[in-house]
Image (spheres, rainbow, N blue to C red):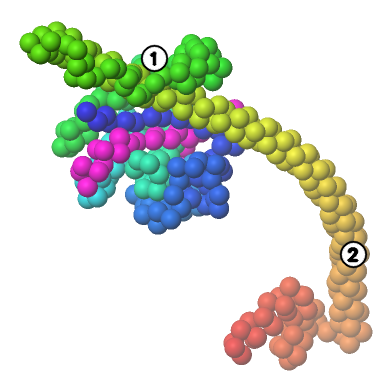
Amino acid sequence: MSYAIIRNAKYKRENLKGIFRHNERRNKNYSNKNIDKEKSYLNYSIKSPLYNYEKEFDRIRKEYNLKGQIKTVSNIACEYIITSDKEFFENIGEQETKRYFETAYKFVCEYKNLGEQYILSAKVHMDEESPHMHLVFIPVIHTKDKNGNAIDKIACSEFWKAKDSYRQLQNAFHSYITANGFDLERGNSGERVHLSVEDYKKITNFENTKTVLKDIKLQLPETPDVKSFGKLVRNRDEKIQELVVEPRDKMIKEQQEQISLLYLTLQSQINTVERASKYEKERKSIMCENRELKEKCENIEKDYSVKIKEEIKKVKNKYEDEIYQLEKENNFLRKVLNTFRKTVDKFIHWVCNKFSVSSEEDFIRNFEFENDTFLNPERQIEYEEELEYEEL
């Protein structure tokens, strides 16, 4: 019987870049040998991100005003991996397979009243051994602030607060998927025990198994042909055939079947251990490379941080000097303008007295009217701008 499978993983911000490149198939090469790149064109999205997962997270957080304190150690996104076994998808066909993942997508939108707007991406992979969907979402809870106002808050720990939260997820997913017409058993939510390769070898007595396997003989043992016994009395042949030959042949056949089964079992066990040994070596090599890359990136980040701070300081000093010079020039121009205004006022007063003009205001008004010019600089600038606008 096939199972409805849904698994959950939690991610910090630093994990999102790698998850994005894997899910959206942005890498050129993959360590996962199960990926058949020639079939990657069969992959499809139920929901595509507008940007990479980091920018998409920032966009959604801003657009929906999501609350919650985010630290570098905070889990800000979760990923459901939704699938079943290969035989199940082969049996239901292409259209039903698509409906299965679309139904699973609707389940996630409705589960804990999450909402489709908080799903970053839902990508179906058809280029691996079994079809499966990677669904990345922001763990948002709907709650209230201190003043009793309804808010949406990013809170992974509260989203998975219940001790049996994964059991609840398995139950809810199984009920939803079977209610929509998919005949599947509930997935196993029990925890698996992960053993190292060396521990597995000890438990299975691996080295002894290899020796036993070499010594197993799959051929039937050679036995004398009773019918060639010419000296046997003819009336005794039937008794010998019934009491000796037939029981002997039956026993040898049963033993041979058991030995064949044992051989296949032991061979499978050896293959499993040898593959595990190979994968463990690859994993250690990858971990070593990742550690070196991480150190290299940290050093590069430190170098750039120092350089950026130095450049910022240079730019800041440069603009501080320019600002100081501009302020100095502005102060001087302000003094010139004030002095010019005082001089103009004195000149008008002198002219009016000199030529016996009765009113300084009339004198100024006549001057502005006849010359189409304002003595007030700000008013003159506004007037000239209005003229330019009218000409356009």
- Residue 344 lies, with reference to residue 269, above or below; the image says below
Q: Where is residue 340 in the image (x, y as percent from the top left)?
A: 89, 73
Q: Nearer the viewer, residue 199 or 248?
A: 248
Q: Position of residue 14 (x, y in %)?
A: 59, 37
Q: Name the residue under label 2.
A: 329
Check if residue 80 falls in the magenta segment: yes
Residue 182 image label: none
User: What residue do we see at 56% from left, 31% from top?
Assistant: 278
Q: How far apart are marks 1 and 2 (CA)?
A: 70 Å
Amino acid type at circle 1 is Lys
- Residue 257 lies, with reference to residue 139, above or below; the image says above
Amino acid type at circle 2 is Glu
Specify start and end residues of the magenta stretch as a single range: 65-93
Viewport quadrant of the C terminus: bottom right
Q: Relative to residue 278, is residue 215 drawn left or right?
A: left
- SS for dot 1: loop
Q: Position of residue 183 (x, y in %)?
A: 17, 33
Q: Mark 1 points at which residue?
A: 163
Check if residue 332 falls in the magenta segment: no
Q: Where is residue 84 in the image (x, y as percent from the top left)?
A: 30, 35
Viewport quadrant of the N terminus: top left
- SS for dot 2: helix
User: What residue do we see at 39% from left, 34% from top?
Assistant: 80
Q: Which of marks 1 and 2 is nearer the N terminus?
A: 1
